[in-house]
Image: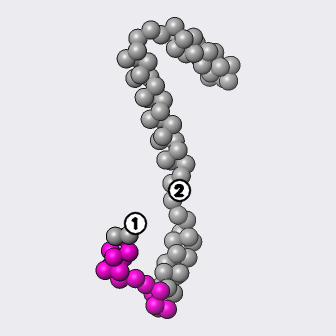
Amino acid sequence: MNAMDLQTRKLNLIEYLINLRDESLFSLIESVIIESKNKKVANTELKPFTQKQIVDRADISNQDYLSGKIKSQEHLEKESENW
């Protein structure tokens, strides 16, 4: 399909929605659109790490551990009580 076909389909859908009188059907269409938008947002926010990023993060974590920049589970639990 070319861009004009898509444009025509969009206009036809808009016309259909304008003339739609069934509230439950409109709500269903609306919920599908919202769900689709939410999935797109979620998918664009989550990108897998590259192998280099993973190795770099592991190196930083190891350096932090060796230099004593760590917190115990108990410390984190106490800290989270104040959130």
Q: In this view, does 50 lie above or below 21?
A: below
Give the percent coordinates (x, y) of residue 71. 40, 82
Give the percent coordinates (x, y) of residue 40. 52, 41
Q: Which mark is residue 47?
A: 2
* Callout 1 secondary element: loop
Q: Which residue is drawn at the image coordinates 51% and 54% (left, top)? A: 46
Give the percent coordinates (x, y) of residue 34. 47, 33
Judge whether residue 79 is colored magenta: yes
Q: Residue 83 carries which label?
A: 1
Q: In which quarter of the image is the N terminus?
A: top right
Query: Is 81 situated left or right of 68 in this image?
Result: left
Q: Which residue is drawn at the image coordinates 65% and 19% (left, top)? A: 7
* Residue 15, picture quadrant: top right
Q: Examine the residues drawn in magenta and state their main secondary structure.
A: helix
Of residue 46 and residue 49, the one placed in the foreground of this image is 46
* Callout 2 secondary element: loop
Q: In this view, does 7 lie above or below 47?
A: above
Q: Which mark is residue 32?
A: none
Say which label, 2 or 1, has the lower sequence index. Answer: 2
Give the percent coordinates (x, y) of residue 54. 51, 71
* Residue 70, picture quadrant: bottom left
Judge whether residue 67 is colored magenta: yes
Q: Rate crowding at label 2 as few (under 14), some (14 to 19) or many (20 or more) other CA atoms within 10 Å.
A: few
- The part of the chain drawn in magenta is 65-80
**What kind of residue is marked 1?**
Trp
**What kind of residue is marked 2?**
Lys
